[in-house]
Image: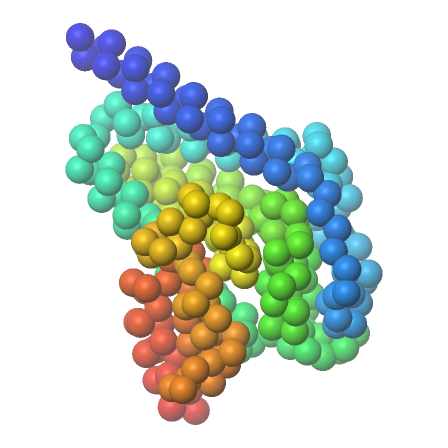
């Protein structure tokens, strides 16, 4: 009886995972051009000729080669977890992994805003800024042109995260158990951060599902993220609300740390 239950769990998760994988590969292959980008961003795109990643990553074979190892490792971790842990453990690991991913986006966003120099001419930018332009183009020049991220394809927004994903999933596999499962949730959620970020820059009047997720607070909403870009009566622009996945739980802590560090200076 227990073996049959395990097989059913494996089958259900495999079907769900296969559906997600196919839909993401389809999304990656969509070419969504964009126009009217400002000079800073345009120069970065022209200058950054995939020296690190290479043009192969834009082909279908390259995309599959990047995504497939992570997909197989994540599938193995999640199916094993479904077979070995009860619902409460799975839920707890999922919540912790989700929040850790949001915290990572918040701290990395704060650091990127503070320590990169994308407002300078491309030839005068620091090496880490140029690396950001290539690995995470959705983040590069985002303050100068916030809406550009909405016109980028899923692959453009997420490619850098998928290149970093296998290393974390290897660690999760080696660690194993509930900790490995939680780490895998963290990694897979983090890889969707720029996609979820882009949803906060888009109107979703005709998309009930996304609108419901944002209204419920499960993912980042436009009103909260708008404060980061434009400030409010209490905060200057770019000084608060750094998280890109959910925000309401982790942002208050990061906001306090950011203000404290600014005060120290």
Nearer to me, 82 or 42: 42
Between 173 and 143, the one lying in front of the other is: 143
- Identified at 62% across, 63% down, the residue is 147
Check the image and report above or below for 63 versus 19: below
**Residue located 77% across and 77% down the image:** 121
Q: Quadrant of residue 128?
A: bottom right
Q: In which quadrant of the rendered image does the C terminus lie? A: bottom left
Can the viewer see residue 7? yes
Q: In what quadrant of the picture does the N terminus appear?
A: top left
The picture places residue 123, in percent across and down from the top left corner, at 79, 74
Please identify the residue farthest to the right as the structure is shown.
46
Q: Is residue 217 above or below residue 58?
A: below
**Residue 38 picture location, percent across and down:** 75, 71
Residue in view at x 35 percent, y 68 percent: 251
- Residue 70: x and y, percent? 51, 35
Asked whether the viewer can see residue 106, the reply is no
The picture places residue 236, in percent across and down from the top left corner, at 47, 85
User: Could you say which is closer to the camera, residue 7 or residue 177?
Assistant: 7
Q: Is residue 159 left or right of residue 194?
A: right
């Amino acid at each position: 009886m227990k073996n049959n239950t395990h097989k059913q769990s494996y089958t259900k998760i495999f079907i769900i995972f296969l559906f997600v994988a196919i839909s993401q590969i389809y999304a990656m292959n969509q070419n969504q051009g964009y126009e009217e980008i400002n000079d800073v961003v345009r120069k970065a795109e022209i200058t950054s000729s995939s020296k690190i990643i290479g043009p192969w990553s834009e082909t279908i074979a390259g995309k599959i080669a990047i995504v497939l190892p992570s997909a197989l490792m994540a599938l193995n971790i999640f199916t094993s977890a479904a077979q070995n842990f009860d619902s409460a453990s799975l839920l707890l690991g999922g919540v912790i992994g989700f929040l850790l991913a949001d915290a990572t986006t918040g701290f990395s966003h704060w650091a990127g805003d503070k320590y990169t120099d994308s407002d300078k001419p491309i030839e005068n930018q620091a090496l880490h800024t140029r690396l950001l332009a290539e690995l995470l183009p959705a983040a590069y020049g985002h303050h100068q042109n916030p809406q550009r991220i909405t016109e980028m394809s899923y692959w453009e927004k997420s490619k850098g995260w998928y290149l970093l994903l296998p290393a974390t999933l290897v660690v999760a596999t080696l660690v194993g158990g509930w900790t490995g499962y939680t780490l895998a949730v963290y990694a897979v959620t983090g890889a969707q951060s720029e996609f979820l970020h882009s949803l906060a820059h888009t109107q979703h009047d005709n998309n009930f599902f996304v609108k419901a997720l944002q209204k419920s607070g499960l993912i980042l909403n436009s009103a909260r993220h708008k404060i980061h870009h434009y400030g409010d009566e209490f905060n200057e622009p770019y000084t608060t609300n750094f998280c890109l996945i959910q925000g309401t739980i982790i942002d208050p802590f990061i906001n306090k740390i950011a203000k404290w560090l600014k005060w120290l200076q």
